[in-house]
Image: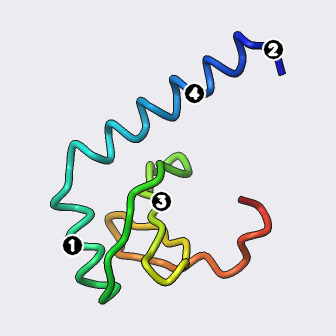
Amino acid sequence: MSDEQSRAREQSLISSLAGVVAFPAYVRSFEKRLGTSALPVGIALSTEEVVLLAENGDIVLGGDAGVQRVWDMTFF
């Protein structure tokens, strides 16, 4: 991967995280449903689901339909 590609991916990640952090109420509502604290780490899929890292180490997708644990984490 070239330096330019690396910078482009880094900028994309920063932009994605900025979108998540802009709506902390969403993160709080997902935490309430999970029953534990969680940290937003990005956005996934074309539906822009919020990717959360739960306090217990679970990776969770949160969106309009609610929250869903990611059981097979080999693709991350």
User: Which residue is the site of mark 3?
Assistant: 51
The type of residue carrying mark 3 is Val
The mark nearer the N terminus, 4 or 3, is: 4
User: Which residue is the site of mark 2?
Assistant: 2
Q: How far apart are marks 4 and 1 (CA)?
A: 28 Å
The residue positioned 47% from the left and 49% from the top of the image is 42
Q: What element carries label 4?
A: helix
Between residue 60 and residue 66, name the one nearer to us: 60
Report if the CB atoms under discs 4 and 1 are less than 8 Å apart. Answer: no
Q: How far apart are marks 2 and 4 (CA)?
A: 12 Å
The residue positioned 57% from the left and 27% from the top of the image is 10
The quadrant of the image that shows the N terminus is top right
The mark nearer the N terminus, 2 or 4, is: 2
Q: How crowded is mark 3: few (under 14 residues within 10 Å), some or many (20 or more)?
A: many
Against 15, residue 31 (above or below) is: below
Q: How crowded is mark 1: few (under 14 residues within 10 Å), some or many (20 or more)?
A: some
* Residue 29 marker: 1
Against 21, residue 40 (above or below) is: below
Q: Distance between the residues labelled 4 and 3?
A: 17 Å
Q: Where is residue 40 in the image (x, y as percent from the top left)?
A: 39, 57
The mark nearer the N terminus, 4 or 1, is: 4
The residue positioned 21% from the left and 72% from the top of the image is 29
Between residue 63 and residue 21, name the one nearer to us: 21
Scheme of image coloration: rainbow
Q: Which residue lies furthest to the left in this view?
A: 25
The residue positioned 73% from the left and 77% from the top of the image is 72
The type of residue carrying mark 1 is Ser
Q: Residue furthest right?
A: 1
* Residue 10 marker: 4
Q: How far apart are marks 2 and 1 (CA)?
A: 39 Å
Report if the CB atoms under discs 4 and 3 are less than 8 Å apart. Answer: no
